[in-house]
Amino acid sequence: MHGRSDRESNRLFDQASGLGFLLHEGTRYPAGSTVLEAGCGVGAQTLLLARNSPYAHFVSVDISDESLARAGEQVSVEGLPNVTFCRADICKLPFRHGTFDHVFVCFTLEHLPDPLHALGDLKNVLRPGGTLTVIEGDHGSAVFYPDTMAAHQVIDCLVFLQQQAGGNALIGRELGHLMADAGFVDAGISLLPIYASPAIPGSSEAVKRIFIAMIEGVREAAVGGGLLDPEDWERGIRDLYRTTEEGGMFCYTFFKAIGKKMGAVP
Amino acid sequence: MHGRSDRESNRLFDQASGLGFLLHEGTRYPAGSTVLEAGCGVGAQTLLLARNSPYAHFVSVDISDESLARAGEQVSVEGLPNVTFCRADICKLPFRHGTFDHVFVCFTLEHLPDPLHALGDLKNVLRPGGTLTVIEGDHGSAVFYPDTMAAHQVIDCLVFLQQQAGGNALIGRELGHLMADAGFVDAGISLLPIYASPAIPGSSEAVKRIFIAMIEGVREAAVGGGLLDPEDWERGIRDLYRTTEEGGMFCYTFFKAIGKKMGAVP
């Protein structure tokens, strides 16, 4: 799971502010609607949701008390009044069927062993006619220059470790079939690609803080676990940094799915 | 080089019509301007250029008489009056410095051993203040589901064979540094991602006709050349087709660069 260490929390906040415009574009909820944020972590997306839809009310759940505490602090600092935090396992939600007008899930399904089951549960707590919005990355979408084997190897370590932990770092590409399999209708997929290069102010910095920091976060597990020897690890990380320097580039695609629960608005 | 066999020509026409909106969005040239299309092939993009900018004049060059003949036919059939075809090697252009107001290059640099040199030549024939637009794919951007090793292997065969022929099927990611190295200013890169699935009418058909057909086009070279044995080849192709069926998806990113030649408009 992301969001544990202090460095991780910083990464997630950077991610939300740097990518907020991209990820939340078009995500605005009507006044008076009640929206479940399933898996709020340390509140990176919560802030943006609450700011962007000030007259909607958000119920943001997470399984970690520690994450919720940090999320709560952030929301308090900004004085946002429209968020209620609730400790809950998103696979065992403590809400009645049809409780929410809308559901928002971001960077959460990637960590679940059974994302299809989770989508079914989320559908249950959604009212008929309500929408589910899911945003996920896909590390297989990373395209960079210079392109080296070593750089791909360190990324592959994260993909493998996340899979070992029951997650899926390549889930972005699966949102289409997951939404359909879970019975959502009118599901649409948007591609949210980012392109970073030193010629675009701040973009390469964001790649370092967000993507490369995330890869570096699994160094111990990867090298200690014997997936890669230390020299290959360092080479791969060095090569990733090289993509943020003069003449380099890094691009990545997020997937955003929006689907509806069948049925008339009550 | 693309565009040789009849099947290849069909693929290229399909590509232009299916992707025309995406690739040519925002590409409109002012009335009275003279635009070089460098590497027009069988005219797939020529048609769209001439239609979209009816009061600009295009000079479309290619090294192949056969391709030019086909391109000419297409333009005649549509009765487009604003295209002049000219047989020329884009690495040895028969035009004086500063001849063109704008230059357009699409799916051409990927075939050249020295794309940087070609960009320099194109800059020479461009007037100061004129723009160069380059569109290229990048096979490393393909993300699909189901994702299999065998499918990646057949794509890798094409990438390898194109490299052996002096080209680069991963050139999209390099447009940024190539434009800068060639001395173009104010260069911007746009990502043009496509997402195909059976839920989006026509999209999976386009993947078959455009991408998979292109891969299948190198079967002989790949299998005959010993890159892959016939069973692995068939498995990879079958797996690619599987991405176009129920529950599957295929996405791909084109890169579009627009840069300017330094200097005031004369």
Image (cartoon, coloured by chain):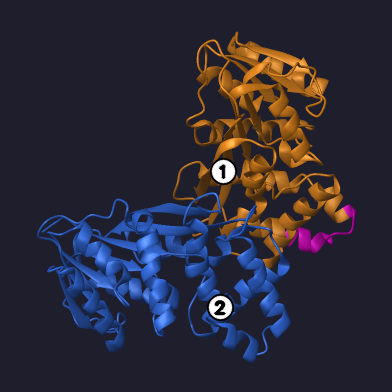
Chain colours: A blue, B orange
Q: Which numbered disc, 1 or 2, marks the residue closer to the eye?
A: 2
Q: Residue at x 30, y 80 (%)?
A: A90
Label 1, residues with CA under 10 Å away: few <14, some 14-19, many ≥20:
some
Secondary structure under tag 2 reads helix
User: Is residue A144 in view from this perspective?
Assistant: yes
Q: Give percent across and percent down for residue A200.
A: 50, 50
Range of magenta residues: B224-235
Residue B180, percent across and down? 64, 42
Query: Of helix, strand and loop, which one carries label 1?
Result: helix
Q: Nearer the viewer, residue A256 or A179?
A: A256
- Residue B13: image quadrant is top right
- The amino acid on which the numbered mark 2 sits, given as a three-letter code, is Glu
Identify the image quadrant of the N terminus of chain B: top right
Picture layout, residue B239 above or below residue B11: below
- The amino acid pointed to by label 1 is Glu
- Name the foreground residue: A1 vs A180: A1
The answer to whether B117 appears left or right of B205 in the picture is: right
Residue B69, given in percent of the width and then of the height, sits at 76, 17
Residue occupying the point 66% across, 51% down: B139
Q: Residue at horizontal 62%, vertical 23%?
A: B128
Identify which residue is drawn at 52% across, 13% down: B54
Residue A216, numbered label = 2
* Subunit under mark 1: B
Q: Which numbered disc covers residue B44?
A: none
Q: Residue furthest bottom?
A: A224
CB contact under 8 Å: marks 1 and 2: no
Is residue A181 visible from the viewing direction of this image?
Answer: no
Considering depth in this image, is A139 or A246 the residue closer to the camera? Answer: A246
Against A170, residue B8 (above or below) is above
Q: Quadrant of the C terminus of chain B?
A: top right
Is B162 magenta? The answer is no
Name the residue tied to disc 1. Answer: B205
